[in-house]
Every structure is written in structure tokens, then in C-alpha cells.
Amino acid sequence: MIRKDTEENFFGLEYLKIKDKIIFKKCDLLNLFEIISIFEEFKPAEIYNLATQSSVGLSFENPHEAINFNILSVLNITPDA
């Protein structure tokens, strides 16, 4: 899953020659129903979360949004949450 508002920068995946082996689904990680739908469709065996708000500048500009996203997005992808 990738953020709906993300810029598609796949340079690293293209460099590793694995981009064509990955299915990208745009998703709002704050929308639990959207996540459940994708999990039901693909039934992943493993999940790697690399989608945090990591910009220090943006975190200081809008700390509530950063905390909200970093906590709720993790809870939403946690099994049995």
C-alpha cells in the first residue's frame, strides 16, 4: 500500500529491478475499512510499515496530524486491532 497523496518515486525499486514484481495499491492508512478491504483482497503473509510522518519540519508545523497519522496508521495495520 502507498499513500494516496504520495509522489510515485520508484527509483530505488527500479534500480533493484523489482518494481515490476510489486503491486502498488493507493490507500488512506487512516481509513480502517480501506485497509481491511486490501488485506482481504491480497491476504498478505507479512507487512512492512514504512509510511510514517518523518519530516521534522512538518511534524513541528502540525504535531497533531503527525502523531495522529503515526499512531493510527500503525493500529490500523495491526492484526486484531
Image: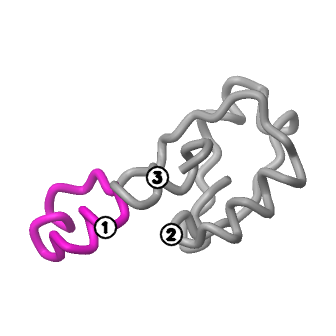
Q: Secondary structure at mark 3?
A: helix
Q: What is the distance, in whole Å, between disc 2 and disc 3 at their CAs?
A: 9 Å
Contact, mark 1 vs mark 2 (Cβ under 8 Å): yes
| Mark 1 or mark 3: whose residue is earlier in sequence | 1
Is 1 in front, or is 38? 38
| Mark 2 or mark 3: whose residue is earlier in sequence | 2
Q: Which mark is residue 75?
A: 3
What is the tally of numbered marks visible in this picture?
A: 3
- The residue segment tinted magenta is 53-70
- Three-letter amino acid code at disc 2? Leu
Q: What is the distance, in whole Å, between disc 1 and disc 2 at their CAs?
A: 9 Å
Q: Secondary structure at mark 2?
A: loop
Q: Which residue is mark 2?
A: 30
Q: Which mark is residue 68?
A: 1
- Residue shown at the point (62%, 59%) measured from the top left: 8
Q: Secondary structure at mark 1?
A: helix
- Residue shown at the point (78%, 51%) measured from the top left: 39
Is 59 in front, or is 12? 59
**Left or right of residue 1: residue 6:** left
| Mark 1 or mark 2: whose residue is earlier in sequence | 2
- Three-letter amino acid code at disc 1? Asn
